[in-house]
Image (spheres, rainbow, N blue to C red):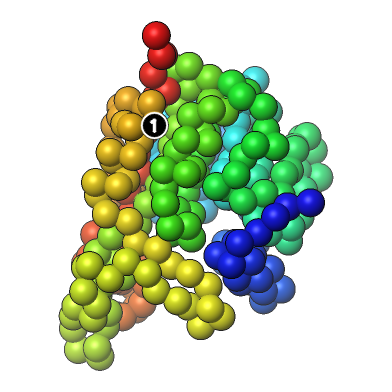
Amino acid sequence: MMTQDKIAAVNQRHWEEEVRRKGGYTLPWLGLDVELINRYAKGELTSTAHPFHVMYPPESLLGVKGKDVLCLASGGGQQSAVFGLLGANVTVVDLSQGQLDGDKTAAKHYGYSIQTVQADMRDLSCLSSDSFDLVHQMYSMSWIPDVREVYEGVARLIRTDGVYYVGYWQPAVAMVGWNGQDYTITKPYAERVDRGDRGEFDFRHSMDEIFNGLIESGFSILRVCEGPFSQHTEYLDADVGSWNHQMGYVAGDFLIMAKKVETV
């Protein structure tokens, strides 16, 4: 039985409600083409027309066949479907059972096996040490107050020389809003906690927490990449004031590629 604190309980309710409402991050990717995924991984596709463009850099999808991959706090049948189609041995950890059901739906649809685990990303004690070659986590750190709790858990799970891909929204994203005429600063940078309409928590982490936390948890940073929301000019043509349009003007997302360092 998973034990929960207030943060986990509130955020779990939020995501179960998102599943019920069929929010965008809860809908399994059931129209994927493995040939297109392979072309994307080789750098032959640059369009944002395909959902997997949010999994970057493209070469992160190369050579994953037969690898043990953990999709962390990444339920919904999206990233796991990409790895499953590429032949990886996929495990998904998520706080929401509804989200994990989406991963099962995608696995059944495409015909690959998957393991799902309902757990808080801050407590991964249910998984064995040194059991993954790759950990993939996109945009979910904003749900928890201390990134080091997750980093330390991942460091235990990932094998030496294993790679950890962890994505973030730029800390300044939440500071900016559309006022009907222009983008303006609406919140102070120092404001680190916000609450959503359903009471869910939104934590904004500083750059020193994000990067130093990784280093202090036993990782070597290999690469930092700005994501598609920051790189593609077609977002400038989106509806003014929309999320995509805002990401075309304000630094959006970035991803850190880190390797577990062998300890002496």
Can residue 77 be seen at all in this image of the molecule? no
Q: Which of 160 and 87 is in front in this view?
A: 160
Q: Quadrant of residue 163?
A: top left
Q: Nearer the viewer, residue 113 or 39?
A: 113
Can residue 153 be seen at all in this image of the molecule? yes
Percent x, y of residue 147: 41, 48
Q: Is residue 43 left or right of residue 224?
A: right
Q: In this view, does 108 lie to the left or right of 83?
A: right
Number of numbered discs overlaid on the protein picture:
1
Q: Residue at x 28, y 40 (%)?
A: 211
Q: Which residue is drawn at 23% across and 81% down?
A: 186
Q: Dot 1: what SS?
A: loop
Percent x, y of residue 245: 30, 71
Q: In this view, does 18 lie to the left or right of 222?
A: right
Vertical side of 189 occupied by 78: above or below? above
- Under mark 1, the amino acid is Ser
Percent x, y of residue 203: 40, 63
Q: Which residue is label 1 attached to? A: 217
Task: Check the image and name the residue furthest to the top.
Answer: 264
**Within-10-Å neighbours for mark 1: few <14, some 14–19, many 20+:** some
